């Protein structure tokens, strides 16, 4: 994300004047914008060249004088002559924001491309760099918006007092969500029956006391913002609270509703800020308060995500839940390296396993699977990678079995390594920081690991 040099804000102009200096096309363009507001629009021009009739404006055909800026909220200067110069100086002296048309470095503010559905306005701004692009974006946004947005917003505004007396917090928000998204309400508004329809929905929400909370166990994918599912994105927008792990990057958490509460139950290594039991009771408590909770987990929630324990707690307390799958790290790693983890005649299956805390029996089992042609994806294995590789060999896996390591899979700053079980057992200490997936098996040789760092040393460590 870049850094903006300007901040889009909504500037109050009601009861004030917008003063436009100049009588030509530049002035006319700004008049078109200014008359969308309730401000009084005043044109000062020594020579009026274009037709301003048809706009509700006051025209003074005479030179600029300083008192023209009394009560002015904004000044537009579309005149390169002495009137424009004098108005610029006077505006600056009074601290009134000045826009010198088509001279970006002289402007205190720019005017965005505007979608006006009062009271809703959508401004597309380009800091003066690309007005044509801004207009194209506006056209695209207009296509997807209901033409009745403004009417719906007014209806919502008119319900404020009634809603405030009956519903609060999340329940009020849910009411408004239904109000502004329901096709029935929109039809009623068009038929002039908006208030009646809004009252009927309000009556229903007011008796629906049990506004039940829910927990959505959502897979956030491997950490790239565009590797979330559309469903994950939608539910993040609806959630009242987002409870997320350390591994989910801020950019992904930020896709949630801006005023949603965010709770990091970060299990950074060596920093167990919440125990699993605490997370379970947190979810139960939040949903029990009637809130809609997005439990955001890296990758897929059902893969090494301790979802089982959270689901058991929710079921015990009869709290509704839904699971939204995500792209698990091993599959992001396969995509990053074009590795077909199953491959005809080479790999007949794919195993998700954790290297962390694996005992001899498990390692023996995986060694046999790898030997039999299955591809292994080892999670949480980086710190024990050398040891795991050595033990797999000790349990009968071939030392020259191909392996690949993907650190930060699915992200732009991923780092790849490739080698064999034997070289991994020696070189694992050099793997970069960050979460890593270790892929083991014949299929790795069929991927594209050209950007990978090669593990070179092959002296086998004795397990
Ligand atoms: N539910 C997650 C896994 C959580 S367990 C999923 O489905 O991906 C945490 C382990 O996942 C890490 O130790 C690491 O092995 C792996 N992991 C998570 N994100 C990763 C990423 N972007 N790249 C590589 N490995 C990752």
Image (cartoon, rainbow, N blue to C red):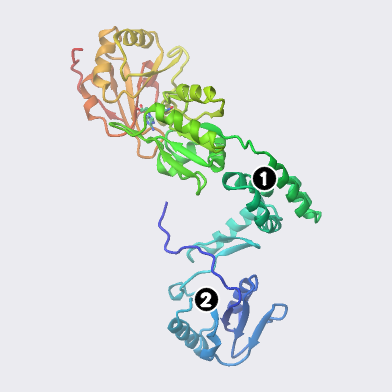
**Among the 4 quarters of the image, the one containing residue 403:** top left
Q: Give me the C-alpha separation between circle 2 and circle 1.
A: 43 Å
Count numbered badges in the picture.
2
Residue 4 - label: none
Location of residue 230 in the rendering, given as x and y in whole percent from the top left corner: 56, 37
Q: Residue at x 45, y 79 (%)?
A: 95
The quarter of the rendered structure image containing the C terminus is: top left
Location of residue 151 in the rendering, given as x and y in whole percent from the top left corner: 71, 58
Is residue 395 depicted above or below 417 in this figure? above
Disc 2 is placed on an element classified as: loop
Disc 1 is placed on an element classified as: helix
Can you tell me which quadrant of the image ligand 1 is in?
Answer: top left
Q: Judge: label 2 CB < 8 Å from ligand 1.
A: no
Is residue 339 depicted above or below 411 in this figure? above
**Among the 4 quarters of the image, the one containing residue 333:** top left
Which residue is disc 2 drawn over? 101
Which residue is disc 1 drawn over? 178
Is residue 427 depicted above or below 63 in this figure? above
| In-front residue for pair 105/338 | 105
Dot 1, how many residues are within 10 Å of its Cα: few (below 14), some (14-19), or many (20+)? Answer: some
């Amino acid at each position: 994300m870049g850094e903006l040099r300007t901040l889009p804000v909504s500037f109050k102009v009601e009861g004030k004047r917008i003063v436009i200096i100049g009588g030509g096309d530049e002035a006319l363009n700004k008049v078109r914008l200014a008359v969308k507001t309730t401000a009084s629009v005043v044109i000062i021009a020594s020579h009026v060249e274009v037709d301003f009739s048809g706009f509700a404006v006051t025209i003074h055909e005479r030179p600029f004088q300083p008192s023209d800026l009394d009560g002015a909220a904004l000044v537009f200067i579309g005149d390169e002559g002495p009137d424009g110069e004098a108005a610029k100086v006077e505006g600056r002296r009074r601290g009134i924001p000045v826009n010198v048309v088509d001279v970006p470095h002289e402007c205190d503010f720019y005017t965005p491309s505007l979608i006006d559905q009062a009271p809703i306005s959508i401004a597309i701004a380009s800091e003066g760099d690309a007005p044509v692009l801004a207009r194209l974006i506006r056209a695209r946004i207009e296509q997807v918006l209901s033409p009745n947005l403004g009417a719906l917003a007014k209806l919502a505004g008119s319900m404020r007092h009634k809603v405030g007396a009956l519903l609060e917090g999340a329940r009020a928000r849910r009411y408004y969500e239904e109000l502004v998204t329901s096709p029935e309400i929109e039809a009623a508004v068009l038929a002039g029956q908006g208030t009646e329809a809004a009252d009927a929905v309000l009556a229903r929400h007011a008796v629906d006391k049990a506004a039940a909370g829910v927990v959505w166990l959502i897979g956030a994918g491997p950490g790239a913002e565009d590797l979330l599912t559309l469903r994950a994105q939608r539910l993040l927008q609806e959630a009242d609270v987002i409870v997320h792990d350390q591994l989910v990057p801020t950019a992904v958490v930020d896709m949630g509703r801006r005023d949603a509460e965010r709770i990091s139950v970060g299990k950074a290594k060596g920093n167990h800020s919440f125990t699993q039991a605490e997370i379970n009771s947190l979810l139960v408590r939040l949903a029990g308060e009637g809130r809609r909770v997005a439990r955001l987990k890296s990758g897929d929630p059902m893969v090494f995500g301790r979802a089982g324990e959270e689901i058991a707690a929710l079921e015990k307390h009869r709290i509704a839940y839904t699971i939204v799958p995500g792209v698990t790290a091993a599959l992001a790693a396969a995509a990053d390296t074009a590795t077909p983890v199953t491959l005809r005649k080479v790999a007949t299956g794919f195993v998700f396993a954790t290297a962390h805390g694996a005992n001899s029996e498990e390692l023996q089992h995986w060694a046999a699977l790898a030997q039999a042609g299955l591809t292994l994806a080892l999670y949480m294995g980086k710190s024990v990678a050398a040891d795991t590789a050595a033990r797999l060999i000790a349990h009968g896996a071939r030392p020259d079995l191909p392996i690949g390591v993907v650190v930060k899979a699915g992200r732009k700053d991923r780092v790849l390594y490739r080698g064999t079980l034997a070289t991994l057992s020696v070189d694992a200490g050099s793997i970069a920081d960050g979460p890593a997936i270790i892929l083991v098996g014949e299929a790795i040789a069929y991927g594209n690991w050209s950007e990978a760092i090669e593990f070179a040393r092959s002296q086998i460590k004795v397990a």
